[in-house]
Amino acid sequence: MTKYTFDHIHLYTADPEATATWYETMFGAQVRRTPVDGKTRIDMNVGGTEIFLLPVKAVATGQNSLDHFGFLVADVDAAIAELRAKGAKVTMEPNTIRPGTRISFVESPEGVRIEVLQRG
């Protein structure tokens, strides 16, 4: 059987620069800008997760083809406090969903839900 491993996420955005800046501020994203056919392609890496930004003319807040993605942290409560201090919109407060798994959600300016989770 073929073995599959995670490679990347594509996010649609009406403003790739603003989106990249938000992820850089909130999550310490390493942003890469590459010239492609006279335009600038923006890609990011957050803790080993590749995120590619795709420009579109408009994105309706809360309407996208992605339910959510998650970032693993050592202490979800501390991470959410830090994100909140930076101005992140917290849509679910930290809570334990089962023994050993604690989660919370924040939302990007364009409505992408981002899970912040702690395991173990």
Image (cartoon, grey):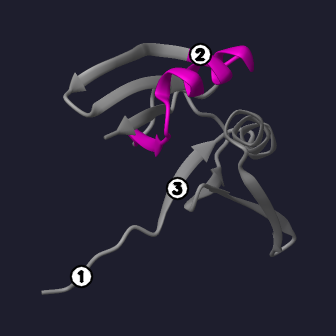
Tag 1–tag 2 contact (CB < 8 Å)? no
Looking at the rendered structure, which numbered label has been put on residue 72? none
Q: Amino acid at mark 1?
A: Lys
Horizontally, residue 53 falls left or right of residue 3, namely right
Q: Amino acid at mark 3?
A: His
Region rendered in magenta: 66-89
Q: Position of residue 45 (x, y in %)?
A: 65, 58
Label 1 crowd bin: few (<14), some (14–19), many (20+), radius 10 Å = few
* Secondary structure of residue under mark 1: loop
Q: Which residue is mark 3?
A: 10
Residue at screen point 42% across, 23% down: 104
Q: Position of residue 2 (x, y in %)?
A: 19, 86
Vertical side of 88 occupied by 50: above or below: below
Residue found at the very far front of the displayed protein: 120
Mark 2 and mark 3 lie on one chain; the one further toward the N terminus is 3
Q: Which residue is mark 2?
A: 89
* Secondary structure of residue under mark 2: strand
Mark 1 and mark 2 lie on one chain; the one further toward the N terminus is 1
Q: Position of residue 63 (x, y in %)?
A: 45, 29
Looking at the rendered structure, which numbered label has been put on residue 3? 1
Can you see residue 67?
no
Q: Position of residue 44 (x, y in %)?
A: 68, 57
